[in-house]
Image: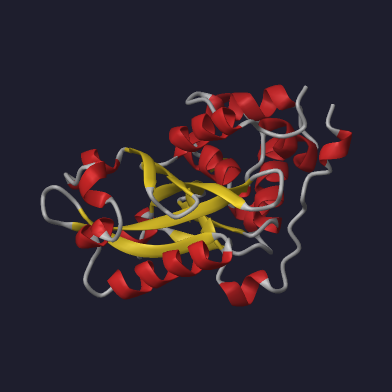
Amino acid sequence: MPDTMSHQQLIKLVSGAAAAVFETDASGHITRLSGWEEMTGQTSHAAQGAGWLEVIHPDDVQRAGEAWKNALDHGIEYNTEFRVKMQDGSYRWYNARGVPEFDGEGNVSAWIGMILRMTHRMRPNAIAPVSRNDASATVVAIRPAALRAARAMLGWSAEDLAREAGLSRSTVRRMETDDAKKSTQRSTMQRLIRTLSNARLELLSEDGTVNGVRWLPYEEQSSTVLPFPDRANCA
């Protein structure tokens, strides 16, 4: 079994969790953009360069653009939130995250990223962050799409998550299917929720069900230990 996900495996995982997926070359030139035109009506050609900022809310344009430029200049993770203009003219909140890929000499060779819908931004009274201290006690279920999104954000394979949570790979796979809630034991769910909440993710819950995830605010991340999988011991 390979100890890391291949590029195509990562693309498949991200595509299943995100509203849109993008790939660029080292300079930021878009080489693949899926889901974006369906969301915004803007073609991949029109999105090239700074074109994508044309469908970002005016109040968010500078922050979104500067964060992307900073990531390109320094080869660091791109992670920001902004409002995107939909085809019907309305705006919705999204979390955009991109990570660099490196060649054999350690230089950035490409970027891969995803854009995730942030439902909690649109419904602040319905969906709220779950405290890491009581996540396993208050959450009884996690939607498959939210679980897939969490794995994609962490860059974990199903094997990685299973090992960190002390579960089998088949259990993790089953929990990513639509009928998982019917057959998942509470103790199993608690293990999974505890693992995700101990990473850098904030779980967004409604009526005891995790409907979304996002990165913790920076000030909270500084005191959070992310359990990176020991890939050398992959089964």
Name the quadrant of the N terminus. top right
Q: Quadrant of residue 171?
A: top right
Residue 167 in the figure: left or right of residue 146:
right
Q: How is the image coloured?
A: secondary structure
Q: Quadrant of residue 21?
A: top left
Q: Could you tell me which residue is drawn at 69 percent across and 52 percent down?
A: 106
Residue 117 in the figure: left or right of residue 79:
left
Q: Could you tell me which residue is drawn at 50 percent across and 23 percent down?
A: 179
Q: Is residue 152 above or below residue 134?
A: above
Q: Residue at the left extreme? A: 88
Residue 187 position, x and y percent, is 72, 39
Q: Nearer the viewer, residue 59 or 196?
A: 59
Q: Nearer the viewer, residue 205 or 154?
A: 154
Circle count: 0
Residue 123 visible in image = no
Q: Is residue 114 above or below residue 216?
A: above
Residue 70 in the figure: left or right of residue 227:
left
Residue 208 position, x and y percent, is 51, 49
Residue 30 in the figure: left or right of residue 79:
left
Q: Nearer the viewer, residue 19 or 44?
A: 44
Name the quadrant of the C terminus. top right
Q: Could you tell me which residue is drawn at 36 percent across and 68 percent down?
A: 65
